[in-house]
Image (tube, rainbow, N blue to C red):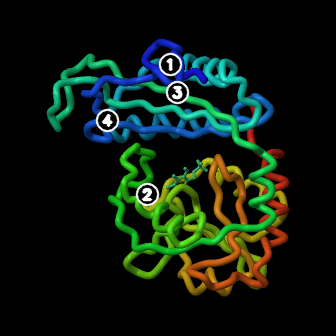
Amino acid sequence: RIAYVNGMYVPHREAAVHVEDRGYQFADGVYEVCEVRGGRLIDERRHMERLLRSLSELRIDAPMPLSSLGVILRETVRRNRVRDGIVYLQVTRGVAPRDHAFPKKGTMPGVVVTARSIDATKGEKTANEGIAVITVPENRWPRVDIKSVSLLPNVLAKQAAREAGAKEAWYVDAGGKVTEGSSSNAWIVTKDGRVVTRKADSAILRGITRTVLLDVLRDHGLKLEERAFTVEEAQTAREAFVTSASQLVMPVVSINGRTVANGEPGMLSLALRRDFHRFAETN
Ligand code: PLP
């Protein structure tokens, strides 16, 4: 395997950044995960736009023009011979003597790109079984709309899910409403067929998969409600699912040990999953 690190393609096992990279010391950086399908990037433009937004919210300089970043993403995918999988891009505020405040102007942002294959048939198998979800109290900072590499609460939530035999953890805010998953957006389908997901304000990450799915819903003539829902509402919903670039539309069949509907992946969830790539941009 090959990784891109600050201007060079290097063997993955030797890929390293400086000990004073601010991503390493302060989690002072942002990232994107893009799906690769048939060797091509899915929704690259939207991911790049979100990257620029994350960078600008944190006042990190863009490391290079987006077109150059695109070339590096593609080249990393090519060199790793990834057909189906993901490409990971991370940009940090760069290397500087450790000091919380920003380093001096002109410090080069740190750029790392990796790519790996994911067995597409495994994903389909998981989707046909559905996943279990647990809930955890929302304990993240109030700017989770920025895709920052500061993911410690997400790490702990995902680990809690794993230890509970579940695949994802949903955060629940102080008002008892679900915000999103530790690495996905959360959705339900009500008994009367309306699709519900939380409004994309600073309480959730505006998932690219979420954005594309809104187009799929429109095409299917489905009613959408962008609002928060409670755990109980989700447990008693007709269907539940999560979305992310790496899992696409993934049906949820249990929440905190309580079965959703008949415990089978929802028909609509699976239909949306099948239709997703018709609405995604392939580059
Ligand atoms: N919410 C969180 C916290 C995430 O980490 C992710 C993706 O990893 C998502 C939502 C889904 O975003 P996307 O569809 O862009 O992958």
The answer to whether marks 1 and 4 mark residues whose Cβ atoms lie closer than 8 Å is no
Category of crowding for the residue at label 3, using alpha-carbon neighbours closer than 10 angstroms: few (below 14), some (14–19), many (at least 20): many
Residue 63 found in image quarter: top left
Alpha-carbon span between mark 2 and mark 3: 21 Å
- State which tag comes first along the sequence, 1 or 4: 4
User: Label 1, on which residue?
Assistant: 65
User: Label 3, on which residue?
Assistant: 113
* Amino acid identity at mark 2: Asn
Query: Who's the residue at 84% across and 54% down the image?
Result: 274
Category of crowding for the residue at label 4, using alpha-carbon neighbours closer than 10 angstroms: few (below 14), some (14–19), many (at least 20): some
Whether residue 6 sits left or right of residue 20 in the image: it is right
* Amino acid identity at mark 4: Tyr
* Amino acid identity at mark 3: Val
Q: Which quarter of the rendering shows the N terminus?
A: top right
- State which tag comes first along the sequence, 3 or 1: 1
The answer to whether marks 2 and 4 mark residues whose Cβ atoms lie closer than 8 Å is no
Residue 74 found in image quarter: top right
Q: Is mark 2 within 8 Å of ligand 1?
A: yes
Q: Nearer the viewer, mark 1 or mark 4?
A: 4
Q: Nearer the viewer, mark 2 or mark 1?
A: 2
Q: Nearer the viewer, mark 3 or mark 1?
A: 3
- State which tag comes first along the sequence, 4 or 3: 4
* Amino acid identity at mark 1: Pro
Alpha-carbon span between mark 2 and mark 4: 17 Å
Query: Who's the residue at 59% across and 69% down the image?
Result: 166
Category of crowding for the residue at label 1, using alpha-carbon neighbours closer than 10 angstroms: few (below 14), some (14–19), many (at least 20): few
Which of the labelled discs sits on residue 24, or is there none? 4
